[in-house]
Image: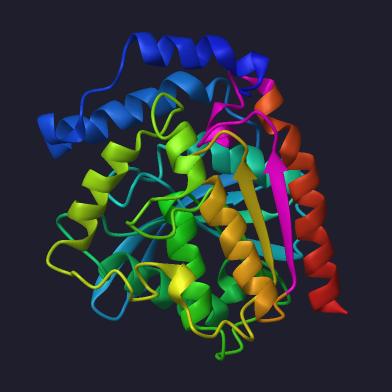
Amino acid sequence: MVHPALEPFIRAVRETPTQHPSSQTLVDRRADYRHLSDAVMGVAEPVESVLDLRLELPDRTLNARLYVPLNDESKALVVYFHGGGFVVGDLETHDGLCRRLSADTRMRFLSVEYRLAPEHPFPASINDAVDVLRLVAGRVGDFDDPSAKLIVMGDSAGATIATVACALTRREDLGIAAQVVICPTLGPELFTDSVHEFGEGHMLDIDHLRYDYGLYLGEWSDHTDPRVSPLMFADLAGAPAAIVVVAQCDPLRDEGVAYAGLLEHFAVPVELLEAEGMVHGFLRLGQVVPEALEVVDDLAAHMHRYVEHASS
């Protein structure tokens, strides 16, 4: 059952359904996504500083944004990958969320603007994430205290990118204390019970996500590639400890639960947090539905515990 505080919001969305993405240009879709993000952001959470950066990778440059909280503990740097179905989203659409998470966790956040599909189809975003983790791990002192641990975090499509990057670099000793995976999409098949129950009218329409997967994958047809469907990884031993956050009324809920189980199978420490009554993308609604942020305090406590353990 959807949380009562979310019901008016959900009702408004259902009464004014969004256009199918195939009927819009990419320019319009991305503009609409930014507009929605602005509408739900509310008053910006105060932080000590915000710095726009350019991350120089071997053959490309990515935009990034560093958030320093007012009560910075300098114990962990969170590398954040935004959601948006691999097709939309940028530093601005997740600015409000990163400010809030940085303030609540008292950790610095480095939000990364990876390359989007269809201009840059799979595996461009995965390659971006892997290269960013390697760069940041080798230059932690440029962004935080040199002793700070790394946490890799993402929501929705960004959670998928974070998950895959952590799996691919798990043998490289990058100093990653934890991966934080929020409402991940873990492959294009999308046939779980939660998809059938919540796949329409709950903030994420599965038909729209399937369309975006088509744009994201382009000519890539192998859905069993674990970089596409992380539940297909044959070995995750040695992956960073994980916090998996799922929303009860999210069509992607069952995938997140399955991923937590897969990590547990390979003896990776994992904690599963379920936000009761919440929908996909609930953390970004926190300014208009404060109840959506009740999970953040719990999440912050879990993140700190993994950082302390990694430092001991």
Residue 31 image position (x, y, % from top left): 25, 30
What residue do we see at 43% from left, 10% from top? 12
Q: In this view, does 255 lie to the left or right of 23?
A: right
Residue 111 image position (x, y, % from top left): 49, 54
Q: In which quarter of the image is residue 27?
A: top left
Q: Give the farthest residue toward the right.
A: 312
Position of the C terminus, as image quadrant, is bottom right
> Magenta span has 276?
yes
Magenta-colored span: 269-290
Total labels: the figure holds 0
Q: Is residue 164 left or right of residue 88?
A: right
Q: In which quarter of the image is residue 228?
A: bottom left
Residue 215 image position (x, y, % from top left): 18, 53
Above or below residue 251? Residue 141 is below
Q: Residue 236 or 298: which is nearer the viewer?
A: 236
Residue 301 image position (x, y, % from top left): 82, 52
Above or below residue 237? Residue 305 is above
What residue do we see at 27% from left, 38% from top? 208
Q: Is residue 182 left or right of residue 46?
A: left
What residue do we see at 31% from left, 52% from top? 86
> Magenta span has 18?
no
Above or below residue 1? Residue 64 is below
Q: Residue 113 or 238: which is nearer the viewer?
A: 238
Q: Residue 258 or 237: which is nearer the viewer?
A: 258
Residue 154 in view of the camera: no
Q: Residue 188 or 285: which is nearer the viewer?
A: 188
Position of the N terminus, as image quadrant, is top right
Q: Is residue 127 left or right of residue 147?
A: left
